Image (cartoon, rainbow, N blue to C red):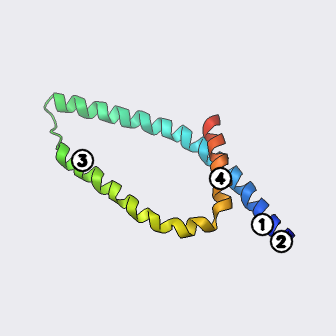
């Protein structure tokens, strides 16, 4: 029984600590990314209203739809994810705590 508990505790501990660090960092980085995207969109709108650039919205929507099509391939990863479920669970809890603290 102890040979099962020790690796499980190790996975849970490392997952929680790693999740906490990643959650904190991702929240801080995501704030910066959102600000940069907002500035970029405002610049595009300004340039478009001034007639400097012309935005092809049909091509933009086709590109976004192509990116979302890759989500169907993610279902095949399910088998690999199940094998590391304890790590993922503790990582998720640590991630949420880090995200909340960030």
The answer to whether marks 3 and 4 mark residues whose Cβ atoms lie closer than 8 Å is: no
Mark 1, residue position: 7
Q: Position of residue 99 (x, y in %)?
A: 60, 40
Q: Are marks 1 and 3 in contact (CB under 8 Å)?
A: no
36 left or right of 58? right
What residue sits right under mark 2 in the picture? 3
Residue, far left = 51
Residue 18 x %, y %? 66, 52
**SS type, badge 1:** helix
Disc with the residue nearer the chain's start (2 vs 3)? 2
The quadrant of the picture occupied by the C terminus is top right
Q: CA distance from mark 4 to mark 1?
A: 15 Å
Question: The N terminus is located in which quarter?
Answer: bottom right
Q: Is residue 44 visible?
A: yes
Q: How far across and down, in percent of the image, does residue 77 sit?
A: 50, 67
- Where is mark 4, residue-wise? 91
At a point 33% along the width and 55% down the height, the residue shown is: 67
- Sequence-earlier tag: 1 or 3: 1
State the separation of the CA atoms marked 1 and 3: 47 Å
Check if mark 2's residue and mark 1's residue have beta carbons within 8 Å.
yes
Mark 4 vs 1, N-terminal side: 1
Find residue 43 and name its label: none
- Residue 55 x %, y %: 18, 40
Q: Which mark is residue 61?
A: 3
């Amino acid at each position: 029984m102890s040979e099962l508990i020790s690796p499980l505790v190790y996975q849970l501990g490392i997952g929680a600590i790693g999740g906490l660090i990643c959650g904190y960092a991702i929240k801080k980085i995501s704030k910066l990314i959102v600000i940069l995207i907002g500035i970029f969109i405002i610049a595009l709108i300004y340039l478009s209203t001034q007639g400097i650039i012309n935005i092809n919205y049909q091509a933009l929507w086709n590109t976004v739809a192509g990116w979302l099509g890759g989500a169907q391939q993610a279902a095949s990863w399910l088998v690999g994810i199940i094998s590391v479920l304890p790590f993922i669970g503790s990582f998720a809890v640590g991630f949420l705590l880090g995200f909340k603290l960030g």
